[in-house]
Image (spheres, rainbow, N blue to C red):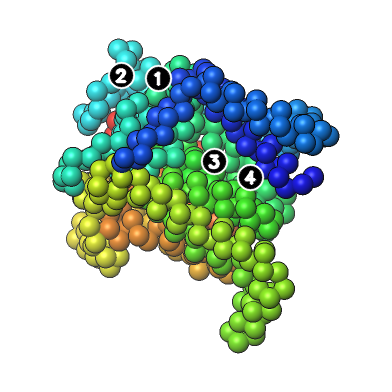
């Protein structure tokens, strides 16, 4: 088919989708400084779609757009992965929620409730925990910034997750909080089959499945059962890695763009994607550079697509920065706002030495008893950083670099704060762990992880500061 036909069909499908959003969800308006983008008129959007579809079929009749959409639906690979996604969802996402419900009933809420509860029923308020309040606030009313970096504000939370929830909330006419929850749970279900496919690139079938179970039962994977952006970021990173391995660079660019719009450190995904594109390093840098030059000469179009994939995560963070500049005149408000959370450079050596001194002075038992949440997150730091080199050796440099760039920057500026949940998205950890353990050991570790996630769910849903 001519490219213009494929382009026209793609635009037509997009316009029909926007038409349905405007029809059932009321559409939306985005203000970018002096520029106002409004997509509220369902009649106008439907008219544009109809005109384009008719013009396309007058000029190029066969195959018709409906038959193409139907053929895509029937042949879509994701249909075959629904049972696998359902198994992971039911076995690993529902139990933490049930544990949370029981913990609220049996233990009660902790003293650090920081947001007004949206419902009178404490069980309906279950997803309203910690950062979920920020995300649902953005989904409901958008971004705000009063130019005071010392006060916590929602501009530090990137837009992909809450804006997706906003669309879901309007289309389904549901609470923004529950829309965030639905998006997070759906993103996790989507991510798991992609992760299994990605793990099969380096591991056999059973080991690949074991690595997925390790990830899904990891204690800090409790955040995949909460209205948090971890699920969406996991989906974006696994999708980008898988598409890069399969040389579907445009798809990888789309996933990379999503990662850059989901988390402040999402743009760092550009580095491991770069490492996935170049020829394998064989120990001789001159031969490697020669192979790289030859590869670039042989297929320049492929290299342009690779370049697009590499820069896409950076484009994501630049788009959000540009939006904040147009909206508030401060493009880096998302970075300045981190000060309200106490994030400032501390250094890795300070982090480690402080805890070593505490253990030497009072003993390991008292460190865990006095600072249990710090101990849990510090354990996650040690778990991730200790495996950077082994992962790079076994799975490839890109995988080790991904772990390092996701963990080190927040550790250097925030210490142990929220590191546990950041490690939950680091799929290379669980691929390596599954690869080095025997089947019996994998079963034991999965059981231990699941027990730890039960504890994490109890702490999180009863408003204990798990971070």
Instruction: Say which residue label 4 marks.
Output: 194
- Secondary structure at numbered mark 1: loop
**Proximity of marks 1 and 4: CB atoms separated by less than 8 Å:** no
Instruction: Say which residue label 3 marks.
Output: 216
Foreground mark, 1 or 2? 1
Which quarter of the image is occupied by the N terminus? top right
Instruction: Say which residue label 1 marks.
Output: 175
Mark earlier in primary sequence (2, 4) = 2
| Alpha carbons under labels 1 and 3: distance apart | 27 Å
Residue 363 in the image: above or below residue 157 = below
Which residue is painted at 47% across and 37% down in the image? 224
In the rendering, at what x and y percent does residue 346 appear?
Answer: 23, 62
**Proximity of marks 1 and 2: CB atoms separated by less than 8 Å:** yes
Residue 208 in the image: above or below residue 124 = below
Q: Label 1 crowding class (10 Å Cα cut-off): few <14, some 14-19, many 20+?
A: some
Foreground mark, 1 or 4? 1
Which residue is painted at 25% across and 27% down in the image? 115
**Left or right for 99, reference 339:** right
- Secondary structure at numbered mark 4: helix
Foreground mark, 2 or 3? 2
């Amino acid at each position: 088919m001519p490219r213009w036909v494929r382009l026209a069909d793609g635009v037509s499908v997009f316009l029909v989708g926007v038409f349905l959003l405007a029809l059932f969800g009321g559409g939306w308006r985005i203000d970018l400084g002096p520029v106002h983008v409004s997509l509220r008129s369902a009649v106008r959007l439907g008219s544009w779609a109809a005109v384009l579809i008719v013009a396309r079929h007058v000029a190029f009749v066969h195959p018709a757009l409906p038959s193409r959409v139907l053929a895509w639906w029937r042949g879509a690979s994701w249909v075959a992965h629904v049972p696998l996604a359902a198994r992971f969802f039911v076995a690993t996402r529902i139990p933490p929620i049930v544990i949370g419900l029981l913990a609220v009933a049996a233990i009660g809420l902790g003293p650090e409730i920081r947001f007004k509860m949206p419902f009178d029923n404490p069980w309906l308020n279950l997803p309203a925990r910690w950062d979920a309040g920020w995300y649902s606030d953005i989904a409901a009313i958008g971004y705000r910034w009063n130019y005071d970096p010392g006060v916590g504000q929602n501009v530090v939370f990137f837009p992909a997750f809450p804006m997706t929830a906003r669309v879901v909330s309007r289309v389904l006419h549901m609470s923004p909080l529950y829309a965030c929850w639905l998006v997070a749970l759906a993103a996790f279900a989507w991510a798991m089959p992609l992760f299994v496919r990605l793990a099969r690139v380096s591991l056999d079938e059973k080991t690949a499945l074991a690595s997925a179970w390790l990830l899904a039962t990891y204690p800090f994977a409790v955040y995949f059962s909460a209205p948090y952006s971890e699920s969406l970021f996991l989906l974006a990173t696994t999708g980008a890695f898988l598409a890069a391995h399969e040389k579907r660079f445009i798809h990888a660019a789309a996933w990379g763009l999503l990662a850059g719009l989901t988390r402040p450190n999402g743009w760092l995904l550009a580095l491991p994607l770069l490492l996935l594109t170049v020829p394998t390093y064989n120990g001789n840098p001159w031969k490697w550079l020669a192979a790289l030059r030859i590869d670039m000469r042989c297929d320049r179009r492929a290299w342009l697509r690779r370049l697009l994939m590499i820069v896409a995560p950076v484009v994501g963070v630049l788009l959000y920065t540009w939006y904040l500049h147009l909206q508030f005149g401060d493009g880096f408000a998302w970075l300045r706002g981190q000060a309200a959370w106490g994030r400032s450079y501390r250094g890795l050596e300070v982090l480690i030495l402080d805890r070593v001194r505490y253990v030497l002075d009072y003993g390991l038992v008292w460190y865990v008893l006095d600072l249990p949440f710090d101990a849990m997150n510090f354990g996650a730091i040690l778990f991730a950083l200790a495996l950077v080199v082994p992962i790079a050796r076994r799975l490839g440099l890109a995988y080790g670099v991904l772990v390092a760039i996701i963990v080190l920057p927040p550790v250097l500026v925030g210490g142990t704060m929220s590191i546990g949940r950041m490690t939950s998205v680091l799929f290379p950890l669980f691929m390596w762990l599954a690869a080095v353990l025997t089947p019996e050991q994998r079963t034991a570790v999965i059981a231990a992880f699941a027990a730890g996630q039960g504890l994490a769910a109890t702490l999180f849903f009863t408003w204990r500061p798990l971070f």
